[in-house]
Structure formats: structure tokens, C-alpha cells
Image: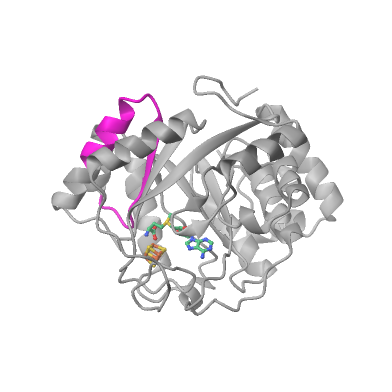
């Protein structure tokens, strides 16, 4: 059971002096996880662009003039080739992302089920992030061998309508309910730096705490401003705010993986170190994160080495 707290209790933790907050989160982190191990995932965009949704941050929305190349659903061979390469590079989880509003019961979904089945034969964890999902579709993914489903809440319920108008917060929560009911693990989280307030961040964290049992994975993205989107000129937030959110998530959901996701290419080595120290223990490798830049694999290897961290091997447990 997550140490669910009401909003005021979350705020009391959130507004602690950062040095005390991180000391508390790191001590909780090392009670549950081997803090020198980082789990690596790789995220492949299997269908890119032309999304009907209006997520104000997203390069793939058909509403905005962004420079991404639209791509139809990749073929099975290409996906398996990329999964094999990701495994060789040290990824223990392979994530398939599609720029869909929702999954439809059609041929492309059947193809994705095939991809999941084939990647499982490589003895990797597989995650999908395909938009909204019915219980039946979640069960089909589970039957195909899927381990996890990513579906981000992105921000607080109060701020959400300012970022996305083509779906509701409840729509997202419904998908997470279907994911859990189908026996898949939940990967959810958000984007910091959308213009949200500290209050919004506490409300977003509270939503994560409402998920019971807590999400097995919490994704923390930092906004990558994309030219042509409504947030293209959004002022960057201080990484100290990212560290703060990671620390509060670690304290309130001590058993969840915390994935330091989009935005790492904007963070210095020291800033990333602070995120790991506060409790993040996963990253995405490869110089492309769906359509956004991400550090080169060699850069990440050098970073981990200089921080005394290493990528967890396939069979290695992160748990103490
Ligand atoms: N289309 C599916 C959906 O919306 O659930 C898959 C989305 S895929 C996982 C993209 C995720 O990356 C979004 O949920 C969002 O949290 C994050 N993201 C997208 N664009 C971003 C950006 N410009 N900066 C940071 N994070 C971003
Ligand atoms: Fe579409 Fe997902 Fe991008 Fe939103 S985040 S515009 S749903 S691809």
C-alpha cells in the first residue's frame, strides 16, 4: 500500500528544505534498492506522427506544424532488429510507442501483438505505450506476453485541461484501471516544466499515490520545448524542481521504479546525478526518445562510470 497522504501532507513533505528532502529520499531509496544499479530501457516509435490529439507538448500531434517525419507502423522485422540491438546495448526493457489516441481492434493492433510475442522470445521485458486502452485490449496484450503498459497522467487534474483538450484526465485513469485489471504492471508519470505550479506538482503526485498498489514504474519527463507546439517557448524549470518531485515520489512510493525519462539531454551530469541520488533508478538509452533527442549511449556509459553507477544486467535484481 503506498504511504498515501492527503494533499496537505504531501505539501508538507514537498516544501521541506531540499537538502533534508533528498537526505530522506536517498535513505529510503537505499533501503529498497541497490543504489549503484540503474535499469536501462529503450523506447522505439513504431508509428510516428499524425496523432489526432492536441497535447500541447507533443511533436506528434497533427494539430501543430512540427518538423518530425510521419511514419506508418514499422514492420515486424525492423522492430525485432531494433530490440536485439537494444539488448546488446544493455537495455533490459524494450518499449513500443505509437502516436495513437487509442488502440483500435484492427490489423495494426494485431501486428503490435505479434511484435510483443516475438520480443518476449529475446528474454527482455516489453512495455507498450499506445494511447487509451480497453480492458479487452489490455488482456490481449497480457496474453501476448506484455509486461508493462505506459500511460502518463502528465500533470495535475487541475492543470490538465490547459495542456490537453481532446481527452479527459478520467480517460487516462480509466486506461490505468484497465491495465491493472488485466494484470499488466503500470508505468505512469508526467512531464515537469509545462507551466504547472508547485501546487499542481503536489496534486499530480497525489494522483500517483491514489493508484493502489502504487505504479510499478513512475516516469518523470522534463519538457523538451518543441518548435511549432504551443509550449515551444515555455521557460525551462530548474532541475532542482525535478529533483524535488523525484524525492517526494521516492518517499511516498518507495518500491516503485523511477524513470528519469525525456529531458536528460538538457541536464548536466551533475544534475542527473542529483536525480539518481534522490531516488531515480532507470533511464532510456539511445540518442532518440520517440522523436526527441536523448544522450548518446557512449555519453551515458561515461556518465554512469564517473558516478560509480552501472547498468543492471538482465537477470540482476535492483532490490536490496
Ligand atoms: N501517444 C501515447 C500517449 O499519449 O499515451 C504515447 C505517448 S509517448 C509515451 C509520449 C510521452 O512522452 C507522453 O505521454 C509525454 O508524457 C512524454 N512527452 C511527449 N512529448 C514530450 C516533450 N516534448 N517533452 C517531454 N515529454 C514529452
Ligand atoms: Fe498523440 Fe500521445 Fe503525442 Fe498526445 S502524447 S499528441 S496522444 S502521440
Query: In this figure, which colouring scheme has been used for the structure?
Result: one colour
Residue 123 magenta: yes
Please tell me which residue is depicted at 66% across the width and 68% down the height of the picture: 199
* Quadrant in which residue 77 is drawn: top left
Does residue 214 appear in the picture of this structure? no
- The x and y percentages for residue 294 are 56, 52
Tell me: 91 left or right of 20: left
* Quadrant in which residue 221 is drawn: bottom right
Does residue 242 appear in the picture of this structure? yes
Residue 124 magenta: yes
| Residue placed most toward the observer, 209 or 23 | 23
Q: Write the start and end of the magenta stretch as one range.
A: 113-134
- The x and y percentages for residue 10 are 68, 56
* Quadrant where the image shows the N terminus: top right
Q: How many marks?
A: 0
Please tell me which residue is depicted at 61% across the width and 39% down the height of the picture: 298
Tell me: 149 left or right of 163: left
Please tell me which residue is depicted at 40% across the width and 79% down the height of the picture: 65
| Residue placed most toward the observer, 244 or 238 | 238
Please tell me which residue is depicted at 79% across the width and 46% down the height of the picture: 22
* Quadrant where the image shows the C terminus: top right
Tell me: 216 left or right of 111: right
- When the figure is inspected, residue 216 is found, relative to residue 267, above or below; the finding is above
Tell me: 71 left or right of 91: left
- When the figure is inspected, residue 264 is found, relative to residue 224, above or below; the finding is above
- The x and y percentages for residue 244 are 73, 55
**What residue occupies the far top of the structure in this picture?**
315
| Residue placed most toward the observer, 135 or 1 | 135
- The x and y percentages for residue 169 are 42, 66
Amino acid at each position: 500500500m503506498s504511504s498515501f497522504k492527503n494533499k496537505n501532507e504531501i505539501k508538507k513533505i514537498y516544501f521541506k528544505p531540499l537538502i533534508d528532502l533528498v537526505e530522506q529520499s536517498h535513505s529510503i531509496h537505499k533501503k529498497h534498492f541497490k543504489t549503484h544499479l540503474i535499469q536501462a530501457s529503450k523506447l522505439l516509435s513504431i508509428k510516428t506522427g499524425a496523432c489526432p490529439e492536441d497535447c500541447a507538448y507533443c511533436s506528434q500531434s497533427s494539430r501543430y506544424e512540427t518538423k518530425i517525419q510521419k511514419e506508418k507502423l514499422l514492420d515486424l522485422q525492423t522492430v525485432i532488429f531494433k530490440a536485439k540491438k537494444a539488448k546488446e546495448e544493455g537495455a533490459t526493457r524494450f518499449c513500443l510507442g505509437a502516436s495513437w489516441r487509442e488502440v483500435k481492434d484492427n490489423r495494426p493492433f494485431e501486428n503490435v501483438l505479434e511484435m510483443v510475442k516475438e520480443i518476449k522470445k529475446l528474454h527482455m521485458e516489453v512495455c507498450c505505450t499506445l494511447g487509451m486502452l480497453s480492458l479487452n485490449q489490455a488482456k490481449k496484450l497480457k496474453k501476448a506476453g506484455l509486461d508493462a503498459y505506459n500511460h502518463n497522467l502528465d500533470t495535475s487534474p487541475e492543470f490538465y485541461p490547459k495542456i490537453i483538450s481532446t481527452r479527459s484526465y478520467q480517460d487516462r485513469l480509466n486506461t490505468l484501471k484497465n491495465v491493472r485489471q488485466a494484470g499488466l504492471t503500470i508505468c505512469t508519470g508526467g512531464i515537469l516544466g509545462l507551466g504547472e505550479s508547485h501546487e499542481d506538482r503536489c496534486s499530480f503526485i497525489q494522483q500517483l499515490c491514489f493508484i493502489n498498489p502504487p505504479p510499478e514504474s513512475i516516469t518523470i519527463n522534463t519538457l523538451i520545448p518543441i518548435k511549432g507546439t504551443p509550449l515551444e517557448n515555455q521557460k525551462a524549470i530548474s532541475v532542482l524542481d525535478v529533483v524535488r518531485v523525484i524525492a517526494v515520489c521516492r518517499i511516498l512510493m518507495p518500491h516503485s521504479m523511477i524513470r528519469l525519462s525525456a529531458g536528460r539531454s538538457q541536464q548536466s551530469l551533475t544534475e542527473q546525478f542529483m536525480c539518481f541520488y534522490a531516488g531515480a533508478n532507470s533511464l532510456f538509452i539511445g540518442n532518440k526518445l520517440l522523436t526527441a533527442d536523448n544522450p548518446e549511449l557512449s555519453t551515458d556509459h561515461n556518465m554512469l562510470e564517473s558516478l560509480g553507477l552501472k547498468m543492471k544486467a538482465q537477470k540482476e535484481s535492483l532490490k536490496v
